[in-house]
Amino acid sequence: MRSRPRSASGYNSAGQITSTDQGDGITSTRVNGNLSGDPATRGMTREVFWTPLQYARVGVHYTAYAKYNGASSNYDGFGRNAKDNNTLFAYLWVAY
């Protein structure tokens, strides 16, 4: 039975969380844009639309985040908060 190579993780000289595979020595960033290494994200999505004709729809789509990349505030070490990723999307949809 072949054993699986061990890996080491931690912070590199630039302060990024990294992972190094002991088998081949390749180093990579574990989770991009994330201070805690936890990719958990929580939020809600709401959409309101109106269908004036059978083949057309006008709507608004809103996404609000309570937790992003593992934290609700300062998730990346640069002061960005989960709510900074909230999005509002308005659209017109037509099909023939």
Image (cartoon, rainbow, N blue to C red):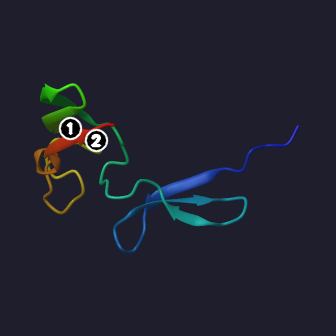
Tell me: 68 left or right of 1.
left
Q: Residues within 10 Å of mark 2 (few under 14, many from 20)?
A: some
Task: Return the x and y of residue 92 as percentages of the image width and height.
Answer: 18, 42
Tell me if residue 15 comes above or below residue 41 in the rendering: below
Q: Give me the residue at 17% from left, 38% from top.
A: 65
Give the secondary structure at mark 2. loop
Q: Give me the residue at 36% from left, 74% from top.
A: 14
Tell me: 61 left or right of 12.
left
Tell me if residue 27 comes above or below residue 2 in the rendering: below
* Whether label 2 touches label 1, CB < 8 Å: yes
Task: Return the x and y of residue 49 as percentages of the image width and height.
Answer: 13, 29
Q: Which residue is mark 2?
A: 70
Quadrant where the C terminus lies? top left
Task: Return the x and y of residue 51 as percentages of the image width and height.
Answer: 15, 26
- From this viewpoint, which residue is outermost toward the right? 1
Q: Amino acid at mark 2?
A: Gly
Q: Residues within 10 Å of mark 1 (few under 14, many from 20)?
A: some
Q: Give me the residue at 28% from left, 37% from top.
A: 41
Give the secondary structure at mark 1. strand
Tell me if residue 50 comes above or below residue 12 in the rendering: above
Q: Give me the residue at 52% from left, 63% from top.
A: 28
**Residue 67's disc number:** 1
Of residue 10 and residue 67, the one placed in the foreground of this image is 67
